[in-house]
């Protein structure tokens, strides 16, 4: 691999032979060490630190060496010395996997997806069969999808969610099983309205955590998983018609989704999720009054939340009732104060009412939360008329 930031060093005498490194503690609290035989014939890559033009040999550190090895492995996962470097890292930095996992999630939560994805990719290259490495990729990618979807870019978000699903599939397939992978996969598919898959993964999580003892975190997660499985069964959310309706509406075929969800509601008229899908399909088809009625029924049956209130607000706005639309959007905001879709819709309502200053204030709030929001950026680039839509 050619990389101007990587310098290959011969193994110094002080490092030759067997390397012993404290690794962990056994069940009795005794320190466990891992052994690694250093091969003097294989050069050690080290990365030149940021801001430096050359490798400071007088200040050479494990961090520079480990960073160099990670870059080499990431660039060439099947390289001649890649497995040797993997074993070297495991001996020298036994906690690196967890450290990088946390770092990737922190970067993703801060919206720095490029760095988060780079970290997650390095994890998968170094720890090729670790479920935690693939869980990192899944969580980072899912968070990115959520951000893109919040900007109203549903088709782009769907592509990203497909990548997240592939990472989850790999995370739950690796051995030994990682309960956290199944638990997070369950919630991922809950959000995707694939309730049968969600129930399957939550069931797997319960199976793998039966002997968790007194772990309070696991106990709370088991309670949530059991409650979700019960609710899915009680509401028949694993019904194939429900899943098909969601998929059709999601890909822009609202007319087919409408047909499916009506058939679902013929047998499950008391399920608020079905009324939400009905309202969503009707809203996509521009049937504003019918959509508003469906969302009101959804809320009446217990589906009260930011999504339902915001969708109701959009329908009311399109019927011309901006006063009621504003009221519903503010109620939606009370559930999720940082929801960009809701704040953007409040801006659009203000525009419909001829209040550009108020609209600008809402869009500034959106940019405070997400400086890259396309709707808000477009508004300030060329102030739109009242036809601007955020939904």
Image (cartoon, rainbow, N blue to C red):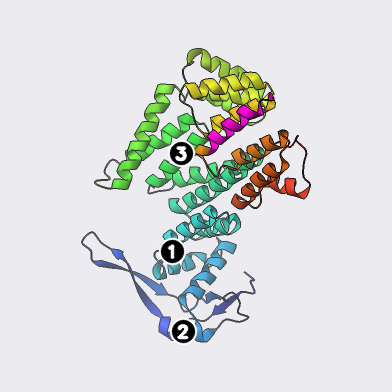
Q: Tell me, yes or no, if residue 1 can be seen here.
A: yes
Proximity of marks 3 and 2: CB atoms separated by less than 8 Å: no
Q: Tell which circle, 3 or 2, labels the residue nearer the N-terminal end.
A: 2
Q: Within the magenta stretch, is there residue 366?
A: no
Where, by quadrant of the figure, is residue 389 drawn? top right
User: Is residue 169 toward the left or the right of residue 347 in the image?
Assistant: left
Residue found at the far left of this picture: 28
**Height in image: 94 above or below 271?**
below
Q: Mark 2: which secondary structure?
A: loop
Badge 3: few (under 14), some or many (20 or more) residues near its Cα, within 10 Å?
many
User: Is residue 15 toward the left or the right of residue 74 in the image?
Assistant: left
Q: Which residues are magenta?
A: 319-333
Q: Mark 1: which secondary structure?
A: helix
Q: Position of residue 351 (x, y in %)?
A: 72, 37
Quadrant in which the C terminus is drawn: top right
Judged by depth in the image, the label closer to the viewer, 1 or 2, is 1
- Mark 3–mark 1 distance (CA, rounded to whole Å): 27 Å
In the picture of the structure, the residue carrying the numbered disc 2 is 12
Q: Residue at x 23, y 63 (%)?
A: 29
Residue closest to the eye, 150 or 236: 150
Badge 2: few (under 14), some or many (20 or more) residues near its Cα, within 10 Å?
few
In the picture of the structure, the residue carrying the numbered disc 3 is 187
Q: Position of residue 159 (x, y in %)?
A: 63, 41
Q: Tell me, yes or no, if residue 241 can be seen here.
A: no
Badge 1: few (under 14), some or many (20 or more) residues near its Cα, within 10 Å?
some
Proximity of marks 1 and 2: CB atoms separated by less than 8 Å: no
Magenta part mainly helix, strand or loop? helix
In the picture of the structure, the residue carrying the numbered disc 1 is 96
Where, by quadrant of the figure, is residue 160 drawn? top right
**Height in image: 86 above or below 321?**
below
Q: Tell which circle, 3 or 1, labels the residue nearer the N-terminal end.
A: 1
């Amino acid at each position: 691999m050619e990389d101007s930031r990587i310098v290959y060093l011969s193994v110094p005498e002080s490092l030759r032979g067997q390397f012993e490194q404290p690794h962990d503690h056994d069940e009795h609290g005794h320190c466990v060490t891992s052994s690694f035989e250093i091969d003097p014939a294989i050069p050690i890559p080290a990365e030149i630190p940021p801001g430096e033009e050359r490798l400071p040999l007088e200040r050479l550190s494990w961090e520079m060496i480990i960073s160099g090895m990670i870059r080499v492995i990431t660039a060439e996962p099947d390289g001649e010395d890649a497995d040797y470097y993997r074993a070297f890292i495991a001996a020298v930095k036994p906690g690196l996997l967890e450290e990088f996992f946390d770092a990737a999630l922190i970067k993703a939560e801060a919206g720095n997806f490029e760095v988060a994805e780079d970290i997650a990719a390095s994890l998968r290259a170094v720890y090729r069969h670790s479920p935690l490495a693939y869980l990192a990729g899944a969580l980072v990618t899912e968070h990115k999808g959520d951000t893109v979807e919040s900007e109203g870019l549903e088709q782009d978000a769907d592509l990203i969610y497909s990548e997240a699903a592939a990472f989850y599939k790999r995370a739950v397939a690796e051995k030994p099983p990682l309960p956290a992978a199944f638990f997070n996969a369950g919630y991922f598919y809950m959000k995707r309205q694939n309730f049968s898959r969600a129930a399957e993964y939550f069931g797997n999580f319960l199976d793998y955590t039966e002997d968790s003892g007194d772990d309070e975190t696991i106990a709370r997660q088991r309670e949530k998983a059991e409650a979700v499985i019960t609710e899915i069964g009680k509401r028949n959310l694993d019904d194939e018609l429900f899943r098909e309706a969601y998929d059709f509406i999601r890909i822009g075929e609202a007319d087919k989704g409408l047909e499916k969800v009506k058939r679902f509601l013929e047998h499950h008229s008391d399920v608020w999720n079905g009324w939400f899908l009905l309202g969503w399909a009707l809203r996509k088809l521009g049937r504003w009054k019918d959509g508003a009625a469906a969302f009101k029924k959804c809320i009446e049956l217990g589906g009260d939340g930011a999504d339902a209130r915001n969708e109701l607000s959009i329908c009311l706005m399109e019927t011309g009732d901006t006063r009621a639309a504003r009221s519903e959007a503010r109620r939606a905001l009370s559930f999720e104060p940082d929801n960009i879709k809701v704040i953007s819709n409040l801006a659009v309502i203000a525009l419909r009412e001829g209040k550009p200053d108020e609209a600008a204030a809402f869009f500034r709030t959106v940019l405070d939360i997400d400086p890259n929001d396309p709707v808000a950026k477009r508004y300030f680039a060329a102030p739109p008329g009242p036809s601007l839509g955020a939904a």
